[in-house]
Image (cartoon, coloured by chain):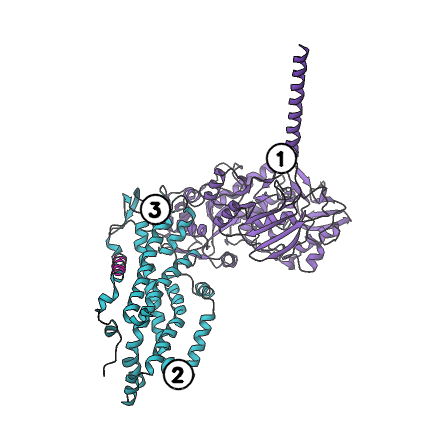
Chain colours: A cyan, B purple
Amino acid sequence: MNPPSEIPPAAGRKSFSEALGESFWLSAIWLVCVIFFAVTADLWPLAEYDHMNWESPAAPPGTEIHAEIPGGGRPVEMKKVSLLGTDTMGRDILARLIFGARTSLAIGLVTPCIGMVIGGLLGMMAGFYRGRTEAVIVAVMDVILAFPGLVFLLAITFILGPGLDHIILALGLLTIPAFTRVARANTLRCARLEFVQSARMLGQSDIGILVQEILPNVIWPMIVYALLVVSYMIVAEGALSFLGLGVPAPTPSWGAMIAEGKEVLDKAPHVSLIPAMVMFLTVLSFNIMGDCLRRAVHPKEEQL
Amino acid sequence: MTSLRNSRKGLWAAACILLSFVFIMTVRAAEPKPGGTLVFGTENEFAGFDALKTRGFAVCDAIANAVIHERLFEWDENGELLPVLGLSAALSDDRKVWTITLRKGVSFHDGTPFTADAVVAHWARLLKPENRFSGRDTITPILSVEKVDAFTVRFVLAHPWLPFLETLCDGRTLAPFIPSPKAVAEDKQSRAPVGTGPFMFKEWLSGDRFVLVRNPGYWKPGKPHLDGIVFKPMPDHQTRYASLESGQTDMIWTDRGGTIEKAEKDERMVHYVSEGTGAEIFILNTAKPPLDDPLVRRALAHAWNQQVCVTLSYQDCIPFVEHPFGVDTRCGDVGYRAHDYEKARELIAAYGKPVEIECLHSNTKRGREQGELLQQFAKQIGVTVNPVGMSFGPVVKKVVTGQYQVSTWRIPSYRDQGPSLYSAFHSKSRRNWSGYRSEEMDRLLVEQNTETDQARRNALLCEIASRINEDVPLIYRGGRRFHVLAKQEVKGSSRFQNGIFALSDLWLDRQPE
């Protein structure tokens, strides 16, 4: 039995890629570039991201700096034009931006996955089994939602210490309730439909129904929501860096780079504005992609 | 001819009247105007005002404290002793007893009369061993404080002690300030301090404001001029400076070169500077591996570049130092370990093992910069430093309990660093948080404590500085220099010593609201 997956037919007369629109593809190109540079950062002849040029703090783009280029053994020191300038500690902004993409993308992409897997599972169970299971799951999620997120993050950082993995874990846990709600709402809707009833009457097991019938209908709304969460998480990392709870030095992150530059906004605005612009474009791209996917998956919602 | 002479006389008379008018107006303009509330932007929330309970008493706390409470004496700008609650101090022939006569007719804000009982009760509380006063090791030579009569007290010392008067006058700690015995007995002193100063405590809203109002019964006639002072904690220095620019505050405390530079270019602002003693340091835990080995500590000291730190992180708003006695003190060569990667690498090679260290720092931009700088310098000699940012409280707790390897720290700015160094480095001191143990250092610390010749004592203090540089229980990040920015209409400021700006004499040259 084929589950009536909502994706291709929902796009109506247009093909699915046409339904996504140009802005989706422009965003996708930007994100592919960011991911490409983040993955291949070690292969480029970039200055070491933690090498400080004492003589050139907050130098404007195009300034010649002493850069340490990592080689096979000891880094080679050489003069190099800093394309995007240096930060307040004299570190090359381009190198930090590219290596920082790893941190920001790791947080942005892994945290929604945590929420999606755990929250999705809980939400589907709540929507499918209803009754006491649903009551317990919904109550627990309400408690988590009511708990101040920042206090939770502070507590996790204080107990486990700072670190990229701890930030990802803490932010991931915070996304679970929202994913649970999305999954539960969609499961409730699907569970009443004929194809689920048919599967039940044909004697399919609960797990079989959940995996084969309901999951394909729940996964797309969750992916659309996850894309929106990606942007929230990238911004959240920035906010945490402002509070000094970001990733530990010398690992760069976009949020930390923006925070570092706020002191010299009047004298050297590029220190903050360049990473802010990159973060803005990335967050915007994830948002646009999420919106486009939603429109393509649920065109009727758009008409409403 | 007569008419010409008359007209000249008339001109002279008019000029004289005009000049007199200008003179009178100038004098009137310079006269303090009573009224108005001064708003002061501080770097931190106050820690409290009870000498036994308060931990982390910062410079801004000391500024507020100095207008609520008073000491027996103060130093003026010329180093002369100024009588405050004490009128005179006489030393016995054996130099072991100080007899101090007290001012009459002074009352605490709660109406309690200021007498010898208040002084004795305060000092007895600090000296009582069971009370575990955290600054006890800085006043070890004081054996007891006794009442002679209602307005005379006697400080009995274990031995002649040169820094005695400096200790009584130091505004940087709570010990010299006499609180109301009633407020102390009622356990209100920490959050609702009561003293004899020109301003009285009104309210304290945590994280928002600390409000003081004029003491109408203040013993100095005509003082203070202001109706009140409001202290507003603003940890972010940019927010603090913006509040000064926008008129939300009248004065702010700052230590950021960028804001100081901006203020100096702004003709609406006045920049006050005060040189201090002490230092911004990294404290090294000499009791824990790998920093229990002097080779590693010396290697780190040589890897560290203080000048870069002062320029890059502090934007030259603090000085470069080689000892904690302030830039005005000349000690000659104290064996400061200058930045030298080669020496550092040799020392690490001699140690022969991989070195990985955790460096605690505050969760501020300045704190992070310090951690990253140490990390960067240490990396050049093959030492891994992992900076860990925390709030101020947990950093202090970890250092005080010895659960750290390296941490950002400060030597406070005291007029006399002898007692402070004794408590920081004597092997039997409770405040020896670096865990440093050295018989030679103990001998020097005891000798400087008992030395009666000032020149010889100064030489001993310099020797202590050399010992510190030799064994490296700390690494200097820079000296202490304090900065206060004020609006032009804040007048009457005269004294800014050791970071403590005397707010008690200020007045506002503006129309009352």
Q: Can residue B321 be seen in this view?
A: no
How far separated are the C-alphas under marks 2 and 3? 57 Å
For mark 2, does the 10 Å Cα neighbourhood hold few (<14), some (14 to 19), or many (20 or more) residues?
some
Residue nearer the viewer, A137 or B195: A137
- Of tags 1 and 2, the one toward the viewer is 2
**SS state under label 1:** loop
Q: Along the polypeptide, which appears first: circle 2 or circle 3?
A: 3
B190 is higher (above) or lower (below) than A159:
above
Which residue position is annotated with label 2?
A130
Residue nearer the viewer, A58 or B289: A58
Tell me where residue B270 sits by quadrant: top right
Residue B308 in picture, x, y percent from top left = 41, 43
The total number of labels drawn is 3
Q: Are marks 3 and 1 on the same chain?
A: no
Q: Residue at x 74, y 44 (%)?
A: B103
Which residue position is annotated with label 1?
B78
Residue nearer the viewer, B142 or A266: A266
- Of tags 2 and 3, the one toward the viewer is 2
- The residue stretch that appears in magenta: A25-36
Q: Can residue B235 be seen in this view?
A: yes
The tag on residue A86 is: 3
Residue A301: in magenta span: no
Outermost residue to the top: B1
Outermost residue to the right: B149
Q: Quadrant where the N terminus of chain B lies? A: top right
| Discs 2, 3 touching: Cβ within 8 Å | no
Q: Do labels 2 and 3 share a chain?
A: yes
